[in-house]
Image (spheres, rainbow, N blue to C red):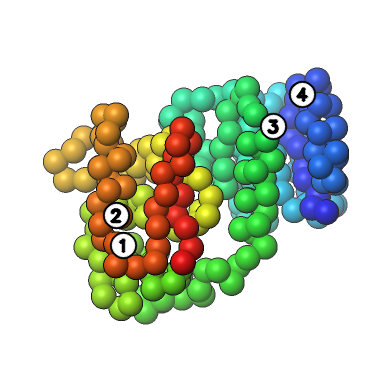
Amino acid sequence: MPTLLIVEDDALLLDALTGQLKQLEYDVCTACSVDQAKALLQTQAVDGIILDLGLPGADGMELLTWVRSQIAGLPVLILTARDGIEDRVSGLNAGADDYITKPFNMQELQARLQAMLRRARQPAFTQPSSASGGPSTTIGPLLLDHASQTATLDGTALELTQREWQLLELLVNRCSEVVTRDDVLAAWHACPPEPGQSSPPLASNALEVYVHRLRKKLDSTPLTIRNIRGLGYMLEKP
């Protein structure tokens, strides 16, 4: 089973989380500070990290930055009480693979861990390069060129606005997984707004409008964007 490193300074939470993950047959090692985590990672291989941000001495973001410079592909899930959209944006921009706020549901954490580790084990899902020389992802007839931020269907270019691209890329990167409204808003906040807009649209139906647009553009393909009631959206593979 995968080995997880939990970096958490709350002893009660650390003990409870360790016990539950061991029951799920994960191998678990722990650290209570950034320095402890760095020392452990230099001597032991792990498959993923669950990282708190509010740590004593040094902030968890420092460890995330260090991990990305030393072990670039190591999956990191942030588990923190910092629930502001700016915090989510900062964590994701710094290289976190997922972000969950406390208090959390153990079943959701388990599902997100499994999805994060599954993505890390499937590098072949992303093609090594595209026509532009950058990374690309292919699902059925859909090809995303991440460097140029363009998409094609069976070789025909899709006309996408900036936010449509961001939404489509997020759905593709997490294909067959639920993408929440907060996930989309964090992605939109992390990128410059579209011309004529000073900030991402926050109206209650804004996301639904963009999903509807993408559905129309993918209508002739076997790709489906499902509405997962109360949770978000999911791109289903053909």
Residues 39 and 150: in front is 150
Residue 11 image-quadrant placement: top right
Check if mark 3's residue and mark 2's residue have beta carbons within 8 Å: no
- Residue 184 place in picture, x, y as percent: 40, 41
Which circle's residue, 3 or 2, is located before the other in the chain? 3
As measured in the structure, the alpha-carbon distance from the residue carrying label 1 to the one carrying label 3 is 34 Å
Residue 100 image-quadrant placement: top right
Q: Is residue 21 visible?
A: yes
> Height in image: 91 above or below 218?
above
| Residue named by callout 1 | 218
| Residue named by callout 3 | 106
Of labels 2 and 4, the one closer to you: 2
- Residue 149 place in picture, x, y as percent: 33, 62
Q: Residue at x 31, y 39 (%)?
A: 207
Residue 67 shown left or right of residue 2 in the figure: left
| Residue named by callout 4 | 13
